[in-house]
Structure formats: C-alpha cells, structure tokens
Amino acid sequence: ILRYALPEFPIQPIPNDHEIYRHYYEMGGPPAGSIPWMGRPEDRRDYLEGIFIGDRLAVLISDRGYWDALIGRGPYSPGILRFCTNMVIYAITHGKISDYSRYTP
C-alpha cells in the first residue's frame, strides 16, 4: 500500500549505522523483535526497511512485532523499549512535529 501512497519514494534498507539506532541509546542495529522468524534462515534480514524523503527517514517498516512487545502482548524486551525510545526521539527532532514557532492560539 505504501508503494501506491508514496510511489516516488522507494522502500529501501535502513543502514545499521543510521542515527535512529544511536539517537538516544547506542544500538548496533534493530533489536530482534518479539515475533519468531518463520521463514528460511537465509531470507532473514539483519536490517529494517523504510522510506526516506530526502535524507530524513519518514517511514519505518518492520515485521518484528515491536508494537506487541510495547503493549504487553509479546515478551518483555529492553532492546525493543530502547529502540522505540530512539524512534520517538528521532521523530520529534526530525519530523518537524515539535516546531510551534508559528503557532497562534
């Protein structure tokens, strides 16, 4: 569906040295996730994918069950909590969603 919504921006790998993995917590790449891999071992990727608009990561794509771990449906994982903290801080500082300089009540 994202390919139809944003056809001009391809889905591409997020390098494991991208700042989303070190924006608050230092991580060497994405955490394993709470959903066990059911495919062939050689098909397992050690990276996440996303959509970049310019040099900014605008969309993060994951099939690793991070949300399940966050809301308590998956096993507790400090790595997932750290990564999600990095995602939120990255979004706030790079998404221009915290700039209220032109806000008029």
Image (cartoon, helix red, strand yellow):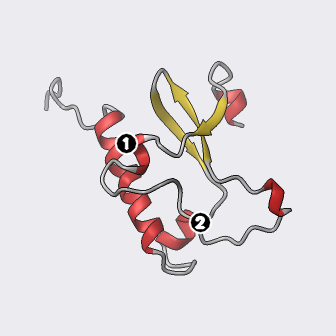
Write down the residue under mark 2: 32
- Assess disc 2: are there few (<14), some (14-19) or many (≥20) residues with their C-alpha within 10 Å of its C-alpha: some
* Numbered disc 2: secondary structure: loop
- Residue 69 left/right relative to 9: left
Q: Are marks 1 and 2 in contact (CB under 8 Å)?
A: no
- Residue 74 left/right relative to 36: left
Measure how far apart labels 1 and 2 are at the Cα level. Answer: 21 Å
What amino acid type is highlighted by mark number 2?
Answer: Ala
**Nearer the observer, 14 or 71:** 14
Q: Position of residue 63 (x, y in %)?
A: 67, 57
Write down the residue under mark 1: 91
Q: Position of residue 70 (x, y in %)?
A: 47, 70
Report the label total: 2
* Numbered disc 1: secondary structure: helix
What amino acid type is highlighted by mark number 1?
Answer: Ala
The residue sitting at 57% across, 78% down in the picture is 74
Check the image and report above or below for 60 versus 26.
Answer: above
In which quadrant is the C terminus drawn? top left
